[in-house]
Image (spheres, rainbow, N blue to C red):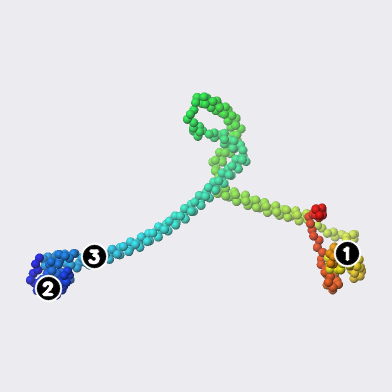
Amino acid sequence: MAPSAHEQSQAPNTKCKKCNLVPVTGLKCVKCKSVMHPGCIKYLKNIKEIDENTILCCESLDEKTKVNMADLDSSSDSITTVIENNMEVEYLKKLLTEKDNAINYLKDNIIALNEQIKMLNVLVNLQNPGVNQNHLCTHPPSMNEYPNKNKTKYNDTTKAVNNSEKKTKTKNVNKTSNANTTKLTSSRENPITSAQVTTAILQTQTNNKMNELINLTKDDQKSSSANSKIIGSNTSENVAASEKLWLYVSKYKTTYTIDELNKFLQGKFPSNSFICKQVKNWGIYSSFRVAVDIELKENLLNPNFWPRGIEVSEYIFRTEPNGFWKYKNSKQ
């Protein structure tokens, strides 16, 4: 490929891309207008020869860069899509686990309800024992349920005799239990559902609570009526005793006696009567229990009425169960 004289004269002062020398003659690129030695072209890659005098050395580089950029874009897009897909997979896994948990919970509820249904059926059978006997007689176990390959003629003959005897017995039983078969068939045609079980349980619980409340109110009424008392209002006879107030008087000297206390009260209120009892002499001071008329309550609970240092308060009788004091005194 020898260049023409026209290209030799018009060769630009550009360096060769291989040897970096300014060629005098060579092949010219149609795109970048650079001239390269014919020998250097052999060592360069991605060069296209258009004809004997022209080449193309720039298009391959541009195409490579375009391809590389496209690859980068596609790779980034693929990375983002992979991340998004992984997140969606995680969400789906979580949803599946939640659904599985809900399904397991519902299965447990179904099992519990089935057990309740079985228990209710057992209670129905216990309340109707004839139904249970009929069930046993009308559904004997088949021979296929209990296979036995090693059979002898002797066993067959004995079983045949036993079966004949059982048939006579079951006939008598079936005659007596014809009334119960209708109950059993009706219960099979209309099986108990879980919703009916739950409503029945709630109904029984509410009925029990209501019965308890009714019984409590009845007991309260009985106790109030038993403990109630009446007060007479007939004025034809004056036989009732005057109402008394019991006082607890303490902090007297040990030498102070009941007569002295009664004399003190009688001197203040000569028209009234008083009952004085000594509670206990503690060795330090004496205490008394005094019964006075109820109309003297305000006067006797006035601090100015009593001598200095004397303590006075209403006496409270302790209520104990019947026989408690007898039992306590017997133990002492």
Q: Work out whether residue 10 can be spotted.
A: yes
Location of mark 3 (residue): 64
Q: Which residue is mark 2?
A: 11
Tag 2 secondary structure: loop
Q: Which mark is residue 276?
A: 1
Which one is in front, 22 or 210?
A: 22
In-image side of 56 versus 249 (left or right): left
Q: Alpha-carbon neighbours of circle 2 within 10 Å: few (<14), some, or many (≥20)?
A: many
CA–CA distance in space, label 2 to label 3? 28 Å
Query: Can residue 262 be seen here?
Result: no
Structural crowding at the residue carrying mark 3, measured as other residues with C-alpha within 10 Å and reported as few (<14), some (14–19) or many (≥20): few
Q: Position of residue 117 (x, y in %)?
A: 56, 45
Q: Residues within 10 Å of mark 1 (few under 14, many from 20)?
A: some
**Of helix, strand and loop, which one carries label 1?**
strand
For marks 2 and 3 on the same chain, the one whose residue lies earlier in the sequence: 2
Q: Quadrant of residue 73?
A: bottom left
What's under tag 1, amino acid-wise?
Cys
Q: Residue at x 22, y 67 (%)?
A: 62
Please state which amino acid type lies under the numbered disc 2.
Ala
Q: Please state which amino acid type lies under the numbered disc 3.
A: Lys
Q: Quadrant of the N terminus?
A: bottom left
